[in-house]
Amino acid sequence: MSTNNPTATEETHFFGDVCKNFDHAAQFTKHDAGLLDQIKSCNSVYRFRFPIRKGNGFEVIDAWRVEHSHHQSPTKGGIRYSEMVNEDEVMALAALMTYKCAIVNVPFGGAKGGIKINPKNYTVGELENITRRYTVELIKKNFIGPSIDVPAPDYGSGEREMSWIADTYATMNPGQLDALGAVTGKPISLHGIAGRREATGRGVAIAVRECVSVAEDMERIGLTTGLSGKKIIVQGLGNVGYYSAKFLSEFGALIVGICEFEGAIYNADGLDVEAVFQHRKSTGSILGYAGAKQEFKNTMEGLEQPCDILVPAALENQITVNNIRNIKAKVIAEGANGPTSPEAEEIFYQNGGLIIPDMYANAGGVTVSYFEWLKNLSHVAFGRINRRFEENSNLNLVNMVEGITGIALTPIQRATIVKGASELELVNSGLEDTMIRSYHEIREIYKSNPAIGTLRNAAMVGAINKIAVSYQNLGVWP
Ligand code: NAD
């Protein structure tokens, strides 16, 4: 029998960093101290342990679920599978979820889960046991449900784990019509939604595109506008990093560097993201990829290579006072949660940089999770009811215009105009709209008062104001 107790040395100060950001932003709001304290605090922290069978014996697994804020219901947030996970980290990530949802106007409170394991050390069967038992523990304490708390994937988890959670929840709640809305990030075959897998990375790419389109801001930091030809380094080639890199290159940027666990690769003329991904899939490493001009065994060196934009998309605390002065990028777009320490951020801004904060930059995932939850509650795929009707209406219009003008459209033009939207197109359009509107909402706050100083502060000010209104409207009872 083995245990894997967290030790004091493993604890981080991530939640403290998030609270520091909160306190700083709170100065620019007019709410009373008690209300601010209620917004900032984690409402419920559930820490638990459960056994699984391992070999001929047992192993005890440490796990958490934190519901940070109930100003909206349900609460929402991913589950992290990592041997580094600890209570402080889960609290920090839950708090970030609260602010993130407020920033992109998704009506959820923030939550997060953690299972302290390295998935690579377990068989698929053992991972299934761990995930199902974790779910049962949440059910026992009323910490999961479509109107209570809705998990999603995070670092180390994906569609497979979400399927196990959905099945466990549905099995334990027979006849509950909305059971599949208890978790998002499910595969499409299990009532997931088109576009969820790539949503966070797509959102990061849209956030970067929007940021670099603002001439005034680009002039201040010494970059030209537009993504075309911008040199970008991405850290992490997992879900967020891979899709961020993929969509950024589709938008015209050059991915010049990729950093992973095992090292980093660089080519100032650009790397083929898909080819690097396939190379890693077949060899287990990004190193050795033929299209790289430089390789670094120390992955952190990869972050310091020449580029315009850096996208940390792996884990927190990657950019600190120890390396910020070596970062060449002018823009840091935080795909990961908490990759930049507050001290490093201050230095980066002083040196003329700009950070697109995690709370906004990686909110594409929760935005599309919201769409998935809506789909599960309505029990119908987006576009299913209106698609044919839309196509017929468009066809009538095209026929009428052709009749009046006497100009016949080409078959391709006709098909493009007539076609009704698919679920994927609707999801991507909703995501794009959310990311663009939210960016300008944040930027307006940023520009409204020079003392606000950073986009993170501005995003936080906006989030605090929205959450404060919810709490004030709800009142306190009992
Ligand atoms: P993932 O497990 O799919 O990928 C993470 C990748 O980072 C892996 O390929 C891993 O090998 C790599 N990595 C780990 N340590 C590294 C290091 N030191 N240097 C370089 N690479 C390293 O996880 P993910 O879902 O992509 O999540 C990444 C980050 O994005 C996390 O901070 C997570 O909280 C955040 N996030 C994820 C989502 C989502 O929808 N998945 C949404 C919002 C935020």
Image: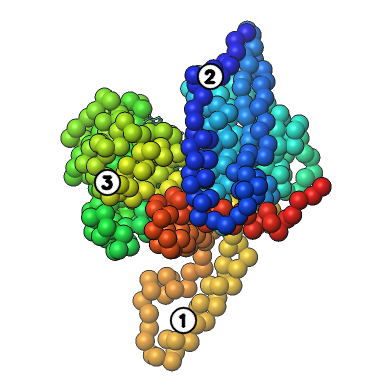
Q: Is residue 384 above or below residue 129?
A: below
Q: Sort mark 1 into few (<14), some (14-19) or many (20+) by Cα contacts within 10 Å.
A: some
Q: Which mark is residue 398?
A: 1
- SS assignment at label 1: helix
Q: Nearer the viewer, residue 161 or 83?
A: 83
Q: Sort mark 3 into few (<14), some (14-19) or many (20+) by Cα contacts within 10 Å.
A: few
Residue matched to label 3: 351
Disc 2 to disc 3, C-alpha distance:
35 Å
**Which residue: 62% across, 44% down?**
37
Image color mode: rainbow
Disc 1 to disc 3, C-alpha distance:
55 Å
Q: Nearer the viewer, residue 425 or 32?
A: 32
Residue matched to label 2: 8
**Which residue: 42% across, 75% down?**
414
Quadrant containing the N terminus in the rendered view: top right
Rendered location of residue 120, percent (x, y)? 48, 22
- Label 1 CB sits under 8 Å from any ligand 1 atom: no
- Label 3 CB sits under 8 Å from any ligand 1 atom: no
Quadrant containing ligand 1 reads top left
In the image, taking residue 186 as reference, residue 377 lies left or right, namely: right
Q: Sort mark 2 into few (<14), some (14-19) or many (20+) by Cα contacts within 10 Å.
A: few
